[in-house]
Structure formats: structure tokens, C-alpha cells
Image: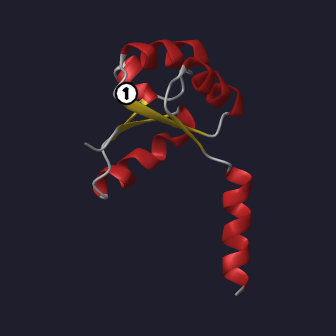
Amino acid sequence: MEPKYLLDQMFNGLAEDLQKDGIDCETATQRIHGDDDSRVSISDDAIVEFLKRETGFVLITADKRLAKRCDASGIRCVAIDQRSLVLDHIRRAKR
């Protein structure tokens, strides 16, 4: 069974694109606040506590501290290195 992904607030805009591609995902804003208003921030504590209760999710974040906390808590997490993604894109574009 494919995991369900929880996108950290920095990736709110990506959720719709991933869903269109068939990826089962929701944003932390949707799941924790119950809406799409990302102007109200969600603390790392709230995200970690949610993921401890809702174990079927894999968090996607670029927040290195949050990723380390998840790792230390046994929470599945994909840590995105945005700097590397940008550099990879620039290198491919130069070819």
C-alpha cells in the first residue's frame, strides 16, 4: 500500500499538482487546521504530535530541524534539500 504524504506548509501549493498526478497527499494546514489558510503557521510541535497520532503519513518538508525531530521520533519523513534541487535544475538546463 502506498503511503499518504503530509506536506509541510512550505509546500502547500504543491499539493494540488501532486494530487492531479495521483499522489495521495494532504497539507499540514488542511489536516491540522482544517482549511487551506497557510497564513496561520503550524508549529513543528503540532506537526510532530499529529504524526505521532496519525501514523499512516510520511511528512515532506525542507525544514531540517523538523526532519531531524521526525527522524529522532521514528516518524517517516522525506527531507527535501531545496538548494540541491535548484542546483540540479540549473545544471540540467545548461546541457
Vertical placement of residue 46 versus 81, above or below:
above
Q: How many C-alpha atoms fall within 10 Å of the one at disc 1: few (<14), some, or many (≥20)?
A: some
Vertical placement of residue 32 versus 4, above or below:
above
Q: Nearer the viewer, residue 13 or 63?
A: 63
Q: Which residue is mark 1?
A: 30
Residue occupying image coordinates x 62% and y 46%: 80
Q: Nearer the viewer, residue 54 or 46?
A: 54
Residue 9 seen by the camera: yes
Residue occupying image coordinates x 36% and y 19%: 54
Residue 43 seen by the camera: no
Question: Horizontally, is 68 left or right of 21 in the view?
Answer: right
Question: Horizontally, is 34 left or right of 69 in the view?
Answer: left
Regarding mark 1 in the picture, which secondary structure is present there?
helix
The residue lying furthest to the bottom in this view is: 95
**Number of on-image labels:** 1
Quadrant showing the N terminus: top left
State the image coordinates of residue 69 (x, y, percent, origin top left). Answer: 64, 21
State the image coordinates of residue 40 (x, y, percent, origin top left). Answer: 53, 21
Q: Nearer the viewer, residue 51 or 74?
A: 74
> Residue 95 falls in which quadrant of the image?
bottom right
Residue occupying image coordinates x 44% and y 15%: 52
Vertical placement of residue 15 versus 87, above or below:
above
Give the colour scheme shown.
Answer: secondary structure
> Residue 22 falls in which quadrant of the image?
bottom left
Which residue type carries mark 1? Gln
Question: Horizontally, is 63 left or right of 48 in the view?
Answer: right
State the image coordinates of residue 73 (x, y, percent, origin top left). Answer: 57, 18
